[in-house]
Image: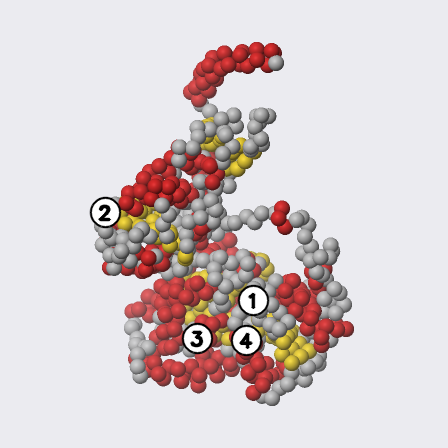
Amino acid sequence: MAERSFAAEVEQLRRGAGETLRVEGILAVTKALLQSGVAYVGGYQGAPISHLMDVLGDAREILDELGVHFENSASEATAAAMLAASVHYPLRGAVTFKSTVGLNVASDALANLSSGGVQGGALIILGEDYGEGSSIMQERAHAFAMKSQMWLLDPRPNVAAIVEAVERGFELSEASNTPVMLDLRLRSCHLHGSFVARDNRRPPVTVGQAAAQPRRDVGRIVLPPASFAHEQEKINERWPAAVRFIREHGLNEVIGADGADIGIITQGGLYNTVNRSLELLGCSDAFGNTRIPLYVMNVTYPVVDAEILEFCAGKRAVLLVEEGQPDYIEQNLNTILRRNGVEVALHGKDLLTLAGEYSSAVVTRGISEFLARWQPDAIEHEPALLRGGDDPASPFAARVAPEAVQPRLPGLCTGCPERPIFSGMKLAERQTGEHHVSADIGCHLFAINAPFNLGATTMGYGLGSAGGAALSAAGSQRRTVAVMGDGGFWHNGLTSGVGNAVFNRSDQVLVVVDNAYAAATGGQDLLSSQAQLPTRSTQHPIEQAVRGVGVRWARTIDNTYDVAKVRDSFLEALTTEHQGPKVLVMQSECQLNRQRRVKPEMREALKQGRRVKRERFGVDPETCTGDHACIRISGCPSLTIASNPDPLRSDPVATVLDSCVGCGVCGANAHAAALCPSFYRTDVIHNPTGRDRLAMRARSLVTRLLSAGLEARAARFEASA
């Protein structure tokens, strides 16, 4: 297994009733699933919930003891479709994936699931990744809840609150026969805290027992006329049932002073930020003892009309803190208040930013303006983050000239096997000219940045080939190049990309970056991974898969670090007379995962006194011309510049940092591009053998003999000078 191991942490999942667990958010979610009697769990990895899948994988022994079925799903759609088991059977099921990108893929399955409804509790755990640190388009899961009439939980970032949200989520789902989405923001997934555990529960009915006693109810199948009845059922039965459950069990919370004539309504996931902002303004403390009443929406859909009216009763003004666009909740609240004739002033995105992450600075600024307008005496402090950027005391004041700080764009890791692929493509383009490159989701997307500048579009995970379909039409003057990773290939690229290209006789060149893992999501194993796993089937070659759907021209390059071979493969694919899709499988192990595997082995070998050899590369400063073409064609973080040791030359020379992992791409690039001979390789040997020592003495002797004349002439030259 390449992904991080949580074997030690998962032992806490065995803790019983009354014991206090101090864990990270994701481990708390896993424990809550087991306490809830979940019968099956599936999902597809993606930040920030990737390690929920990893934790579940490491907890397989515990899951087996409880009779819980777990599997890594091929895609988010596969995971969502698993919840079909809860339609006819009293099985509690949970699936997990990354927020809106996962919902985009899973929306068809979820729409059908929500239409027919569920008997057992169905929980969709979403890893919300919104804001500047996100790697995806800036959209919200809220729209999917509204579209398909699924309930959306957004609990306070607190371990105990998250555990309760999981348990109540199952109950809410069963009480209203509706799937429930649980939104876990980035910080909720990684926060640490404690809660009092309960005993794990074996599911009352296991998936095996359910399969042995098949059931069917035609009224639950999404087919007319039942599908028309489902819409009425959602509004007339399921919605009121959900509202009753939310109110009876107090899922939403009112925190703070009674009788105040202003208040704040916030999404549960933003509670910590709101309270911190109030603390900075002197209106609360670190323990949540606020002087401004708060209505915390741990359930953001459906909005409970009666609770909104009760909270706003007798208030002059209310501020809604709702992150993201569109302003779904604000529109909803306005409708509720105006329909009921409540004249309270409702503020929201008029005082807070319309879009973007609601950081402490953004929320503090908005709350400060709200309080200044409606209750200015409540503000006791003016935090520094409210000061303008021209104030030296502001944390946002410029410390150096903006032009002196160059932005650092995301890039490939040191030694990444994908770097030489794009180096080879750039070298091939010297002969073929530039091509339109349809990019895809994954590490390889970093090739859109310098120094490669390759890639024009990206349409979604595994859609690199499909994204170049129109430009691969017959009569195109130059072949389109499409890129996808092995993760995207097995996700849906084989059918939507390769199969589509075969069917339409597309003449594009598809590059499948096969680094043996779903590297961008944490290094999980795939169908084509080389690891031998006891519970999964691997070692299925990608080339065989593409030939299986009709590709006739396919090549596997099993060492991407051979830049010359990679370049020649591109030239062949771009110039061959063969018509139809051409697939290049570029195969080398992800360097990050390789280092995770190799470094512990090296440490153990060193501890045991065994011989360990480590390859290192360098640049001869006396040979380097300072041209830096090697850097422009590589972009490796370990390849940088240093001062020129020659006093007669001012241009800095290239140099290799100690972070080098010895992949050899810099030297291979220099050779393939006929750049210069300044690169060299050295072997660093720990615990050398007698043979190593003898070889070293022999090399040193030869070096002294060959350089003796040069050193003597240099000494005479310096003496005469």
Few, some or many C-alpha atoms within 10 Å of disc 2 (few <14, some 14-19, many ≥20)?
Answer: few
Q: Are marks 1 and 2 in contact (CB under 8 Å)?
A: no
Give coordinates of residue 573: x percent, y percent.
29, 45
Where is residue 132, by image quadrant? bottom right
Q: Is residue 271 left or right of residue 464?
A: right
Relative to 171, say whether 52 is above or below: above
Relative to the observer, which residue lies in front, 8 or 274?
A: 274
The residue identified by callout 1 is 355
Say which residue label 2 marks: 577
Q: Nearer the viewer, mark 1 or mark 4?
A: 1
For label 4, the residue is: 329
The foreground one among 304 and 571 is 571
Which callout, 4 or 3, points at the residue further toward the start of the chain? 3
Are the residues tagged 2 and 4 within 8 Å (C-beta)?
A: no
Q: Residue at x 40, y 42 (%)?
A: 423
Name the amino acid, label 2.
Glu
Identify the amino acid type marked 1: Ala
| Residue occupying image coordinates x 59% and y 84% | 337
Q: Amino acid at mark 3?
A: Lys
Q: Earlier in the sequence, mark 1 or mark 4?
A: 4
Q: Quadrant of the C terminus?
A: top right
Which percent across, then down, holds residue 551? 24, 52
Gap in angstroms between the C-alphas marked 4 and 3: 14 Å
Task: Name the residue that disc number 3 marks.
Answer: 147
Is the Cβ of the residue at disc 1 closer than 8 Å to that at disc 3? no
The secondary structure type at the circle numbered 1 is: loop
